[in-house]
Amino acid sequence: RQEPYSKPEKSSPLKSDAHGPCSNNIFFFAIIDWKTRNQRPQHICRGLAKSGYRIFYFSPTLGASNEIIINEIEKNIFEIFLPYERKTWIYNENINIENSKEYIIDIIQTFSITNAVIVTQFPLWYNLIQLLKKQFGYKIIFDVLDNFSDFDNVSIAVNEYEQKLALLSDICVCTSDKLASKITKYNSNIEIIKNGTEFNLFNKPVKNEILK
């Protein structure tokens, strides 16, 4: 469950080399804000950033400010908060692309983006993603990390947009065989990448009295 933080930091000055022309870009349309927790989205982004990609991490929190907020939170990773007609988040919002596309265009121009790949982890980004694919031809990776209809705080349209997004995507990545079986009805190009954990971090738990 997303608990959006209402006052993200204002945009920080970008490093001079952040604006250079680059074809190795990822538009990552996220399911959680970066600081919400440290899980699959952060691990994927950090791995790609270390491989030389610039990551533009679009927060699911919409309308937190009247201006676009861009912060370089780690090297080559930029968290972006989009302005919106009201304060909400992507879980229950069929996003109005007219309110968002101009900011995406500004990002493309500001960062001299010559090509990009879209990674998305939530279906209700669909309208914006469809526009980007139509206008720029970007490839799409749909990271299907959960059964979204089981969430208690999402739009009832999530199943419809999950199907549309699967059909639109160039490849779907699923976290389980069960999810892959569901998505294969709409896209046959599927890879299974299951969730894991950092063994060195969790193999020596700190003793405590919590369970007593």
Image (spheres, rainbow, N blue to C red):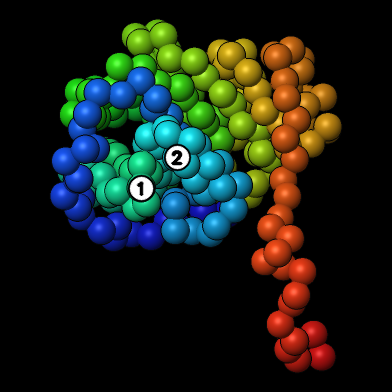
Label 2 belongs to which residue?
49
Report whether residue 142 is seen.
yes
Q: Is residue 121 left or right of residue 59?
A: right
Q: Secondary structure at mark 1?
A: loop
Label 1 belongs to which residue?
75
- Mark 1 nearby-residue class (10 Å; few <14, some 14–19, many ≥20): some
Toward the viewer: 23 or 117?
23
For the image shown, how many numbered marks are present on the structure?
2
**Residue flagged by tag 1: what amino acid is it?**
Lys
Residue drawn at point x = 56 percent, y = 35 percent:
121
Residue 90 location (% of width, % of height)? 45, 40
Q: Which quadrant does the N terminus fall into? A: bottom right
Residue 137 location (% of width, % of height)? 41, 9
Residue 203 location (% of width, % of height)? 77, 69
Q: Which mark is residue 198?
A: none
Q: Tell me which label, 2 or 1, sits earlier in the chain.
A: 2
Toward the viewer: 151 or 203?
203
**Residue flagged by tag 2: what amino acid is it?**
Ala
Q: Quadrant of residue 179?
A: top right
Q: Secondary structure at mark 2?
A: helix
Asked whether the residues under the numbered discs 2 and 1 touch, taking CB atoms below 8 Å apart as contact, a structural biologist would say yes
